[in-house]
Image (tube, rainbow, N blue to C red):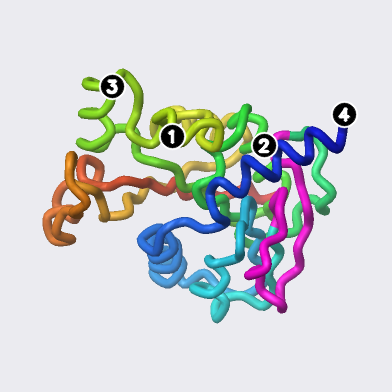
Amino acid sequence: DGQAIHAGLESRDRLSLGSSCDAIYRMVDEFLGASKISGGTLVDVGCGGGALWRVVSSRFARYCGLDAVRYDTFPADGEFRRVNLDSAEWPVPAASGDVVVAIETIEHLENPWAFMRQLCSLAKPDGWVLVTTPDQTSVLSLLTLAIKLRFSAFQDAQYPAHKTALLAIDLERATREAGLDVVRLIYSGQGRVPGTAWHYPKALASVFPRALSDNLMLVSRKHRA
């Protein structure tokens, strides 16, 4: 029933502890700064505890977070909307975000193509849509796939929180089919050395970003009306 579904969603959502890693937040913030994107409303889909807002709040006038769970750390100055991101209907006005972000969220969902259509709907005409996900073609992920027959971010320990592994080309295809223009792919520049807890030196990761990054971000933009 509805209560059981909601309880399952909340349990699955809490597996992520409502946050991602600082390298991903920095990747988003650096892109916004380099592109001189500011003002208006940021819609954070799969917002967790709102950690992204603490990094980019100076760039926007308003913050709206969407998730299945409201965490105690969600910013007091933000607007929260409880949403089942796997559902077909979201209680959020269309064209409400100047920038719509989904940080490490799409891999948790059952239908990435439907999710991208929802993100497109949320963005204003000419608005930006930023989506991050694990980089399945990193050295770590490909080596893990060769040895364990599954990507590094999709081991048994990550299931059922992590459901859908997407290659960059899958993300690009879903983005275009949703009606968004693909602008570029950006890699986090932080990646774990296989078999260790160490990370590659930043200078080395900047030379081989795809191979040595744990995460990537697809930047897209909605067509003008």
Mark identifier at residue 148: 3
Q: Which residues are magenta?
A: 66-86
Q: CA separation, marks 1 and 3?
A: 13 Å
* Amino acid beneath label 2: Arg
Residue at (17, 40) in percent of width and height: 195
In this rendering, is residue 128 above or below 74? Answer: above
In this rendering, position of residue 178 left or right of residue 2:
left
Mark 4 vs mark 2, foreground winner is: 4
Residue under label 4: 1
| Residue bearing the label numbered 2 | 117
Is residue 80 shown in magenta?
A: yes
Locate the N terminus by quadrant. top right
Element at label 2 = helix
Q: How many marks?
A: 4
Quadrant in which residue 21 is drawn: bottom left
The residue identified by callout 1 is 157
- The x and y percentages for residue 133 are 45, 43
| Spatial CA span between label 4 and label 2 | 27 Å
Residue 128, quarter of the rendered image: bottom right
Q: Residues within 10 Å of mark 2 (few under 14, many from 20)?
A: some
**Residue 209 percent location from the top left of the image:** 23, 48
**Label 4 sits on what residue type?**
Asp
